[in-house]
Image (cartoon, rainbow, N blue to C red):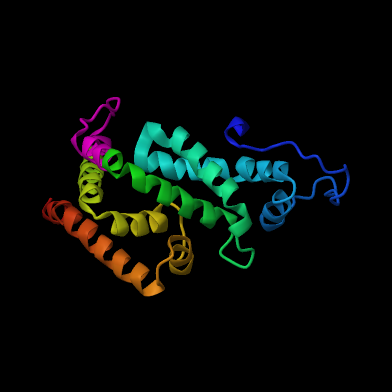
């Protein structure tokens, strides 16, 4: 996967940078700082964080995740000199870049949610009445939630999914998206209301059953 990173070989004299002791992991912030002069130092960040960023992208755009992961790390590499070590940290920073990359693919993301909402149940048959009911409930929940996500505006959906799928705090989301914390709160409140309303019929049906 490292082939995605434009890491030029360093021409500096060897051993200028202090070597990490065996078994000691170099902190993310230090790697970003070192990579400004020694680009190859950026590679461990890909190894550490690509799986998490890929999962986030895959949940939003499915099969496009590989390409968008490469684009995310390319943007991060090019912007590494602007990274703030006193900020929210490298992984939230990467989630923010990934979210901005996704904004050029909103139509594909919405199409994915709508396709999920229409997707028939293809799971293997389950034995037992309770198992069948549980699976039917899960399928209905998936379809309703996917349709609700498709109906959200881009900003509200970004905040909701950075909270739910990237596990970022309000402050982290505000910093990586460059918006006030109050805006994060209002967008999240609005998005949660929409998804709650979309799932309300399922709750009512459950209460009546």
Q: Residue at x 36, y 67 (%)?
A: 184
* Place of residue 34 in the rendered image (x, y in percent of width and height, measured from the top left): 73, 52
Q: Where is residue 75 drawn, in percent x and y?
A: 52, 46
Q: Nearer the viewer, residue 1 or 77?
A: 77
Q: Any magenta on residue 48?
A: no
The residue lying toward the viewer, choosing from 132 and 150, is: 150
Q: Residue furthest front?
A: 11
Depicted 17 relative to depicted 196: above or below: above
**Picture mark count:** 0
Magenta span has 122?
A: yes
For the question of whether residue 23 can be seen, the reply is yes
- Which residues are drawn in magenta? 110-135
Left or right of 156, for residue 65: right
Residue 147 position, x and y percent, is 20, 46
Q: Residue at x 26, y 60 (%)?
A: 191
Query: Taken as a whole, is the magenta stretch helix, strand or loop?
Result: helix
Residue extending farthest bottom? 182
Answer left or right for 10 relative to 146. right
* Displayed quadrant of residue 203: bottom left
Q: Residue 64 at what x, y percent from top left?
A: 39, 33
């Amino acid at each position: 996967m490292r082939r995605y990173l434009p890491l030029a070989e360093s021409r500096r004299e060897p051993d200028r940078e202090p070597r990490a002791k065996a078994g000691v992991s170099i902190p993310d912030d230090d790697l970003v700082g070192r990579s400004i002069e020694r680009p190859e130092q950026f590679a461990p960040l890909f190894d550490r964080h690509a799986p998490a960023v890929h999962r986030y992208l895959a949940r939003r755009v499915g099969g496009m995740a590989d390409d968008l992961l490469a684009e995310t790390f390319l943007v991060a590499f090019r912007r590494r000199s602007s990274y703030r070590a006193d900020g929210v940290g490298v992984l939230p920073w990467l989630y923010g870049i990934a979210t901005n990359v996704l904004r050029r693919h909103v139509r594909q993301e919405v199409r994915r949610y709508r396709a999920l909402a229409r997707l028939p149940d293809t799971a293997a048959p389950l034995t037992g009445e309770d198992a069948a009911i549980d699976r039917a409930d899960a399928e209905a929940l998936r379809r309703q939630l996917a349709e609700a996500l498709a109906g959200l505006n881009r900003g509200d959906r970004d905040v909701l999914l950075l909270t739910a799928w990237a596990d970022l705090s309000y402050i982290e989301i505000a910093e990586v998206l460059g918006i006030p914390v109050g805006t994060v709160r209002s967008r999240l409140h609005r998005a949660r209301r929409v998804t709650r309303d979309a799932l309300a019929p399922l709750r009512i049906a459950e209460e009546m059953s």
